[in-house]
Image (tube, helix red, strand yellow):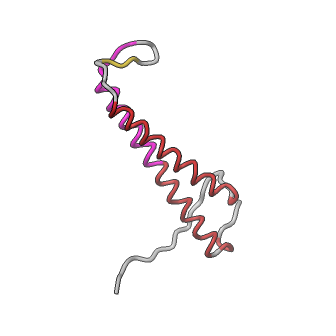
């Protein structure tokens, strides 16, 4: 016999209607796929010594990669967390539609 923790989650998805749930899941999936494609592209390239900022100033490539990795981590965490909340809402919508309201 297995065991686990049951919980009830009362969530709120800001500015997302019930009709948009599937599309928003797809957007999260595409964001996650895009980030992985970009990471693979960085891994496959021969790195230059320097990167340029928006003003044309050069700075070390390793600093650029570190900043890019931080940005990817933040984007991934946000997309994955939102996707999980959307999936929870979709599951509730299918199992207990009366528990999903807009307002």
- The majority secondary structure of the magenta stretch comes to helix
44 up-or-down from 102: above or below: above
Residue at left offset 54%, top offset 65%: 88
The reply, left or right, for residue 98 in relation to residue 80 is right
Residue 52 position, x and y percent, is 39, 17
Outermost residue, top direction? 56
User: On the rendered image, what quadrant is the C terminus found in?
Assistant: bottom right
Quarter-of-image position of residue 3: bottom left
Residue at left offset 63%, top offset 75%: 96
The reply, left or right, for residue 81 in relation to residue 93 is left
Q: How many marks?
A: 0
User: On the rendered image, what quadrant is the N terminus found in?
Assistant: bottom left
Q: Is residue 76 magenta?
A: yes
35 up-or-down from 53: above or below: below
- The magenta span reads 57-78
18 up-or-down from 52: above or below: below
Outermost residue, bottom direction? 1
Residue at left offset 44%, top offset 77%: 6
Q: Nearer the viewer, residue 13 or 65?
A: 65
Residue at left offset 36%, top offset 32%: 42
The reply, left or right, for residue 97 in relation to residue 62 is right
Q: Nearer the viewer, residue 18 or 7?
A: 18
Q: Is residue 40 magenta?
A: no
Residue 101 position, x and y percent, is 69, 66
Q: Nearer the viewer, residue 27 or 66?
A: 27
Residue 98 position, x and y percent, is 68, 74
Quarter-of-image position of residue 40: top left
The reply, left or right, for residue 16 in relation to residue 31 is right
């Amino acid at each position: 016999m297995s065991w686990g923790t049951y919980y009830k989650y009362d969530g709120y998805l800001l500015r997302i209607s019930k009709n948009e749930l599937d599309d928003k899941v797809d957007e999260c999936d595409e964001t996650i796929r895009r980030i992985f494609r970009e990471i693979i592209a960085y891994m496959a390239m021969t790195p230059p010594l320097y990167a340029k900022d928006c003003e044309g100033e050069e700075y070390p490539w390793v600093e650029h990669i570190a900043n890019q990795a931080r940005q990817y981590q933040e984007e991934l965490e946000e997309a994955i967390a939102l996707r999980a909340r959307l999936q929870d809402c979709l599951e509730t919508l299918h199992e207990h539609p009366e528990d999903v309201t807009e307002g």
